[in-house]
Image: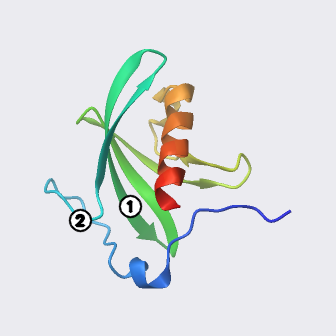
């Protein structure tokens, strides 16, 4: 069975730039999630690194994580140093939301 991996069209790769800026971007998405009764405000910024789509995720305006595809668990996961601090339910909800935005 073929593995589903989030992808981005070649034409879109050129329009996504990996920068750290505080201003809004055209490809940035803002949304809210409620996980286990806890509300979260999410800012999602797609970036391409070595031809791989990743997401810079900012939670409640201050906590930042980097998400990328993990083929072992077949979901987007946080890979930064503080990823272990992210609640499992929130990481799963973020993965599902990000994947749904790619369709």
Residue at disc 1, secondary structure: strand
Task: Please tell me how crowded label 2 is: few (under 14), some (14-19), or many (20+) other residues with Cα within 10 Å.
Answer: few
Give percent across and percent down for residue 1: 86, 62
The residue that mark 2 highlights is: 26
Q: Is residue 38 above or below residue 28?
A: above
The residue depicted at 23 percent of the width and 59 percent of the height is 20
Nearest the viewer among 13 and 63 is 13
Give percent across and percent down for residue 97: 48, 44
Nearest the viewer among 38 and 49 is 38
The residue depicted at 44 percent of the width and 35 percent of the height is 82
The residue depicted at 36 percent of the width and 82 percent of the height is 14
Q: Is residue 59 left or right of residue 22?
A: right
Q: Is residue 49 above or below residue 57?
A: below
Q: Is residue 20 above or below residue 85?
A: below
Looking at this rendering, what residue extends furthest in the left direction?
A: 23
Which is in the foreground here, disc 1 or disc 2? 2
Counting the numbered discs, the total is 2
Give percent across and percent down for residue 42: 32, 39
Give percent across and percent down for residue 77: 56, 45
Q: Is residue 10 above or below residue 70?
A: below
Label whose residue precedes the other's in the sequence (1 or 2): 2
Residue at disc 2, secondary structure: loop
The residue that mark 1 highlights is: 46
Indicate which disc residue 102 carries.
Answer: none
Q: Are marks 1 and 2 in contact (CB under 8 Å)?
A: no
The residue depicted at 21 percent of the width and 62 percent of the height is 25
Task: Please tell me how crowded label 1 is: few (under 14), some (14-19), or many (20+) other residues with Cα within 10 Å.
Answer: many
Q: CA distance from mark 1 to mark 2?
A: 10 Å
Q: How is the image coloured?
A: rainbow
Looking at this rendering, what residue extends furthest in the right direction?
A: 1
């Amino acid at each position: 069975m073929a593995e589903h991996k989030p992808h981005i069209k070649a034409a879109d790769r050129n329009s996504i730039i990996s920068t750290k800026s505080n201003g809004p971007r055209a490809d940035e998405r803002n949304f809210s999630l409620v996980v286990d009764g806890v509300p979260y405000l999410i800012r999602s910024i797609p970036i391409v690194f070595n031809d791989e789509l990743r997401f810079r995720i900012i939670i409640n305006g201050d906590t930042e994580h980097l998400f990328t595809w993990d083929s072992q668990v077949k979901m987007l996961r946080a890979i930064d140093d503080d990823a272990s601090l992210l609640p499992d339910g929130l990481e799963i909800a973020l993965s599902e939301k990000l994947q749904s935005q790619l369709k």
